[in-house]
Amino acid sequence: MRVLESASQRYDFGIRLLSLGHIEGVYDRVAQRARGPEVLDLGCGTGNVALRLARRGLRVTGVDLSPEMLDRARQKTPPGAPIRWLHASALELIDHFPADSFDTITSVLLFSELSEAEQAETLRQCHRLLRADGQLLVADEVRPPTLARRALHHLVRLPLAAVTYLLTQTSTRPVRDLEAKLAAAHFAPLSREGNRLGDFILLEAQKQEVPDAVAA
Amino acid sequence: MRWPRDLLLDLLQTCLRVLPWPTEPRLIRVGHPGREAPLLLTGNYDLTVRRVVRALRGQDAYLLVAPTRGINVWCSAAGGLLTAHQVISILRTSGISELVDHRRLILPQLSATGVERKLVEQRTGWHVVFGPVYARDLPAYLAEGRKTEAMRQVRFPLLERLEMALAWAFPVSVVGGLVLAIGWRHLLLPFLAMVWAVTFALYLFFPWLPGPVERASRPPPGWTRYLVFFDPTMRRNLIVWLVWVLGLWGYAYGSGTWNLKSLIGWSLASLFVVLLLSMDLAGSTPLYKSGLHEDRLLHIELNQEACRGRAMCWEVCPKNCYVIDTARHKAVIAEPDACVQCGACVVQCPEDALAFVTPAGQRLAPEMIRTYKLNLLGRRAASISQ
Ligand SMILES: C[S@@+](CC[C@H](N)C(=O)[O-])C[C@H]1O[C@@H](n2cnc3c(N)ncnc32)[C@H](O)[C@@H]1O
Ligand code: SF4
Ligand code: SF4
């Protein structure tokens, strides 16, 4: 969703409009489920999830690749809130944090912006940064499971996608097989919520220990 | 046989060049690369990837395709989509570190405005060098191990100008053609002829038409930013239009066939097409900064004290603005007027000796250019003009 990002001031308004208001509920649910006390919000954007987490009193780190989005997040941060913002890529987490740094990692609408290889590497780094039994919360656009729903999805999304494409010259790419990817990265599923169309899910998973031979 | 498919794709993607054509970021093996094979990188714009692979035919090399959202190297670097982060990403996800014994990564020179070399080197241990601007110079560069002045310079040769003409004429024909096909069928052929004639004339004669108003000393008045369709500093387009209209009226006069109404109609229609083409004429060429950015009012300032003659600026400048005084170990800006404000030198200078200065004399910190790039999509441009 480049157009929203490039104009970070308009991002919050735009994403609410595009999601027909549903996105607020997603932010709320993700923020409520996070266990803490130490949380990383990955691809934090303008800080919608991170700020909610901080309001609950959790210690939050927001990481994003876009300096403009982070500027906006900083503007929205009330003085004294327990948040630090970091300009970095999801693939550079290991450069900034030691292993076992966080109890929870949240990530909303980030994976759909990453390539297949980047998704796998990001999950690997998340695994490393989480403490034992740490929690992963991922919400994103996904490819609907059945052909019929996929057709319906395209019908609904096509006009939107066309407009986004014309304005931004980029298209978003729903994530494929997100659950399988989490499992492959040694996360055990805890819960799963989807919308009716099956093109958006919120997954909660737990870090599983990996035998040393595999971890290396 | 792959080439018929490649040829068709080339043609399609050239015609629809205004759209991004992403291909999956990955590692490509060219020939039979061994553990000492050179490592190159490009963005994931499909057309470029195919061209680089073709240019490397006969070589043994590795090519990394970085995630730049299907945008070409220069545009993505200037727009913040090809930065140190995307380079680090593909270095880490491709597994290349296990495949070669050396640690030397060759980036396209035009990525220098986006990719902070220092950051890549610190994070990954890879040594970064900026290779030639054009893929076709890669074999010579790999054989020689160094760049000539010609390899560092951007150009706008005939072939590229024709591609650009195609990239504009095609979408304009399709959109205009569809509209006319609804109710003005008889105008369709003359319209298409007009579009292709004007577009190709513009790009074919581009080098010989008078250029933009060079180096304005003051920013243009604020309201000009609403002239979305018209870049007020480019005169080439209007000259092409004038010649076209004169030809049209001359022909009508000579043959005595057309009436005044259709003459005026066609003159206006062609003016519209010309304005559409000049929407970003400067930005459609590699020679100028997009006419719609006020960045082009910036000029480079060199702090002689800080400069240590490390020649990074000289290595990355696509307009060969710099010469290095090897006796004094200092850079000299020999061609200040050739500068296209790409920012590559500012981003790469290891001593922070270079900076952009606004017409009002304000110095923009190099760190700010490194973080936000030049194209702040309007936001910082606004503060420059104030
Ligand atoms: C669609 S926005 C979602 C923002 C926020 N999570 C929300 O839901 O409001 C996607 C965000 O991911 C960020 N992003 C994209 N690629 C990234 C990467 N490799 N590492 C970190 N952040 C990235 C973008 O800068 C952008 O802010
Ligand atoms: S890169 Fe900087 S330090 Fe090096 S020669 Fe150029 S201006 Fe001087
Ligand atoms: S001198 Fe101008 S053209 Fe050359 S690298 Fe610097 S900004 Fe780019």
Image (cartoon, rainbow, N blue to C red):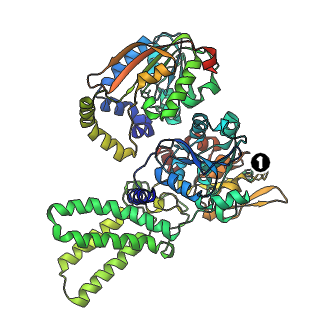
Height in image: A210 above or below B33? Answer: above
Question: As shown in the figure, which amino acid type bears the numbered disc 1?
Answer: Ala
Quarter of the image for the C terminus of chain A: give it.
top right
Label 1, residues with CA under 10 Å away: few <14, some 14-19, many ≥20: few
**Chain at tag 1:** B
In the rendered image, which quarter is residue B152 located in? bottom right
Residue corresponding to mark 1: B306
Residue shown at 49% from the left, 68% from the top: B159
The residue furthest bottom is B254
- Asked whether residue B209 appears in the rendered view, the answer is yes
Measured from the top left, where is residue A84 in percent x and y? Answer: 56, 22
Q: Residue at x 44, y 21 (%)?
A: A49
In terms of depth relative to the viewer, which is nearer, B174 or B348?
Answer: B174
Where does the image place residue B169, in percent across and percent down from the top left? 35, 65
Q: How many marks?
A: 1
Report whether B283 appears left or right of A19: right
Image coords of residue B153 (percent x, y): 62, 63
* Nearer to the camera, B265 or B190: B190
Q: Is residue B293 above or below residue A44?
A: below
Q: Quadrant of the N terminus of chain A?
A: top left
Q: Is residue A71 visible?
A: no
Image-quadrant location for residue B184: bottom left
On whether ligand 2 comes within 8 Å of the CB at mark 1, the answer is yes
Q: Residue at x 47, y 59 (%)?
A: B283
Q: Secondary structure at mark 1?
A: loop
**Residue B128 locus on image (x, y percent):** 69, 45
Quarter where residue A102 is shown: top right
